[in-house]
Image: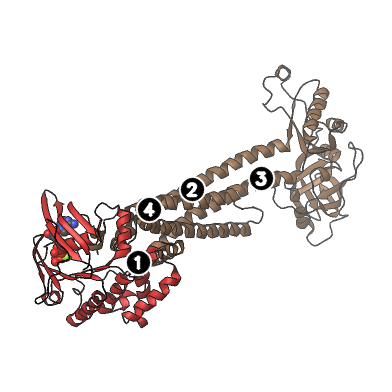
Amino acid sequence: MRAADLIRFARDAATGNPLRTGLLILAMAIGVAAVVVLTALADGARRYVLNQFSAIGSNLVIVLPGRSQTGGFNPGNAITSTPRDLTIDDAQALRRASAVHRVAPLAVGTSEISVGGRLREVMVAGTTADFIAVRRLTLAQGRFLPPGDWRRGASEAVIGARIRDELFGRDEALGQLVRVGDRRFRIVGVLAATGQGLGMNTDELVIVPVALAQAMFNSNTLFRILVEANSREAIAPAKAQVSEIIRLRHEGEEDVTVITQDAVLATFDRLLGTLTVAVAGIAAISLAVAGILVMNVMLVSVTQRTAEIGLLKALGATRATIRNAFLTEAAMLSVAGALLGFALGHAAAALIRQLYPAFPALPPDWAVLAGVATALVTGLAFGVLPARRAALLDPVQSLARR
Amino acid sequence: MTAPLIELSRIERVFHLGDSQVHALQSIDLCIAAGEYVAVMGPSGSGKSTLLNLIGLLDRPDSGSYRLAGRDVTTLSADEQARVRSERIGFVFQSFHLVPRLTAAENIALPMVLAGIPPAQRGERVRQALRDYGLENRADHRPDQLSGGQRQRVAIARATIMQPALVLADEPTGNLDRTTGEDVMRLLEDLNRGGVTLIVVTHDGALGARARRQLLMADGSLQQDRPRSGGTRSETCALPT
Ligand SMILES: Nc1ncnc2c1ncn2[C@@H]1O[C@H](COP(=O)(O)OP(=O)(O)OP(=O)(O)O)[C@@H](O)[C@H]1O
Ligand SMILES: [Mg+2]
C-alpha cells in the first residue's frame, strides 16, 4: 500500500468516527497543552525573578552587616558576640578599591511625609549621588541628589512616582517643600515609575542624603553598601577587595556578608530551572494517560472493525498493511492532538501574558519539543498493541463478525 | 485441454469446540479446471463455506494438499497467501462486505489500493468497472445509499478489478430478491464466459442448476459431483489416486 493511500485510508477511518476521534485528540491535546502551560508558568517564574534581580543593577556586590554562616567556625567571631555596624566611613573606604567603580551607602527607615495637610507613611532611603546609577534607576523629572560630602547634604529629596501622584496629584511636585519626620526637604526630582519589584519598591520611596537620613533615624549605621564593580569580570576581585577592606577596618574580624548578584541569580536560576523540569515531568504523566487512552480506543476500534479487517485480508492485504493502517491512524490522532495541544497551550500562555504583562509566561522550546515528541511516541507506542492484534486476526472469523 | 486450476486431495478440516470436534471437511478430493463454473450445494452446516474459504486461502486445512495453478499453496506464508489472494482470487459475499465509510468507487478501488497500484491507473480501471456494472451515477454514493442489488454489483466490480483467474461467491444472492439475484448471477456468469473460473455456494437449487458442474455436500463430504444434465464432464482433471 502506498504511503499516500495509507494516510488517506487512516484519515477516512478516523473521520468515520468523529466522536471517538475527537475525544482522543482532545485527551492528547490536554496533555500537550498541560506541558506547554505548566512549563510556561514555571519558566516564567524563573525569568521573572531573574529580570527583577537584573533590574536592581548589574555587576552588583552587596555588603550586609552581620556574618552569614558560610565561613564555618571563626574564633574571632566567638569572642566578640556583637558584630560591628557598617558605617559611612566603611562605605567611603570601599571607593579606593581598584575593581570598584561606584559605591552607594544605604540607610533605610520608615517615616511620615506630609505636604499641605496630606500625610502618608513612607520608606526613607538615605544614600548618595551614585545610587541612581548603581541601582539603574531613571528619573521622570528633575535631578537626583548632587554629589558632594557624604557626611553633609542639602535638605533635598527625590520621591517615587507613586508618592508624587498621591501627594501632588496633578500639581507640580518639583520645588515643593515637604516634611519628612521632623525635617523639611525640597523636592528636586521624581523617579520614573517601575511597578512592583522584588525588595524595595522604588515607586513608594523617598530618597534623601544619607547623613540626613541617619540623623533622622538617630543612628550612624548603614542598612547596606551597594558596590558596583568595574565590569562583569571584576565582580570576583571586587568582592575580595571589599571583604578585605572591611576586615581590616573591623580589626581583622569578618563580621559582614558580601554577596554578589551573580551568586544569588545562579541559585535562583538553578532552583527554578529544576522546578520547570519537575513540572514538565508531572505534565508528561497526563500524556502517558492519554497514551493508554489511545490504546484502549484503538483496541475498541479494532473490535468494531473486525469485519472490515477480515475483508481487507480477503482482498489481499498483508499483515504489515493492516498493522501500518492502524499505526498510521494512531500516529495521525497523536499528531493532531499534539498540534492542537501546542496551539491551545500557546494560546493559554499568551492569555496569561496578556493578563499579567509583568510575568513572562513563555514555554521553553525544549519543553514544547519534549511535549510534542512524547505525545507522538506514546501515541505510536500504545498504538502498536492494537495494530498487532488487528494484523493477526483470523480472516474467516473476522468476516463472520458483524 | 485446460490445465487444472484447483487440485484438492484428502483435505481435512476439523474445528475444536471445547472437547468435541467438528469435522467440517472430511477427505475432500476435488479438481477444478480453469474456466469452469461450479455450484456448491448442500444443507446448512455441510461445510460449503469452509470449503470455499479454504480454496480462497482464507483458511488452512488440517491435512491434505491444495495445489493452485500447479503450485502447492498450503505451505505458503500468510503474506505469500495474501499476495495470491490479491492477484488471483476475487471474493463475493452474501452480506456484500462493503466498507461503509467509502464510496462505491472507493470500495471498487480498494484491492488496487491495497496492492499499491498507482492512482492514475486505478482511476481508469474504476471508471471502466463502473460502466460495466451500470454504476456510473452511483460512483460517489456510500453503501447505505445503494440498493442491495447495487451493493452486490459494487462487490462484484471490486472482486474483479484485479482481473483474478478465480472468483469465489458464498451465497451471493442470499440477501437479494429473486429477480435481483438473477441479475447478479448473470453478471457472474458473464465473467465465467470471459474465462474466469467461478465457484458459487448456493442454497437455491434453481440457481445451482445453472452451473455446468454441481457439487453436493453433506456432513463435510462430497456426496455428488455431477455435470449439468446434458453436459459432459471434462476429463482434463484426473483425480489423484
Ligand atoms: N470457526 C468454527 N468453529 C467451530 N465450528 C465451525 C467453525 N466454522 C464452521 N464450523 C462448523 O463447521 C461446519 C461447517 O460449516 P460451514 O460454515 O462450512 O457450513 P455451510 O455449509 O456453509 O452452512 P450454511 O449453509 O449454513 O452457510 C458446521 O458444523 C459449523 O458449525
Ligand atoms: Mg455458509
Residue topped by disc 2: A284
Q: Amino acid at mark 4?
A: Met
Chain that appears brown: A
Lower sequence index among marks 2 and 3: 3
Horizontal and vertical percent position of residue A11: 43, 64
- In the picture, the quarter occupied by the N terminus of chain A is bottom left
SS state under label 4: helix
Residue topped by disc 3: A49
- Subunit of label 3: A
Mark on residue A295? 4
**Residue sitting at 19 percent across and 54 percent down?**
B65
- Subunit of label 2: A
Chain B colour as displayed: red
- In the picture, the quarter occupied by the C terminus of chain A is bottom left
Residue topped by disc 1: B111
Comparing labels 3 and 1, the label whose residue is closer to the camera: 1
Comparing labels 2 and 3, the label whose residue is closer to the camera: 2
Same chain under badges 1 and 2? The reply is no
**Residue sitting at 29 percent across and 57 percent down?**
B81
Q: Is mark 3 within 8 Å of ligand 1?
A: no
Lower sequence index among marks 2 and 4: 2
Crowd class of label 2 (few under 14; some 14 to 19; many from 20; radius 10 Å) = many
Judged left or right of residue B37, residue A270 is: right
SS state under label 3: helix
**Residue at the front extreme of this rendering:** B1
A144 or A109: which is nearer to us? A144
Same chain under badges 2 and 4? The reply is yes
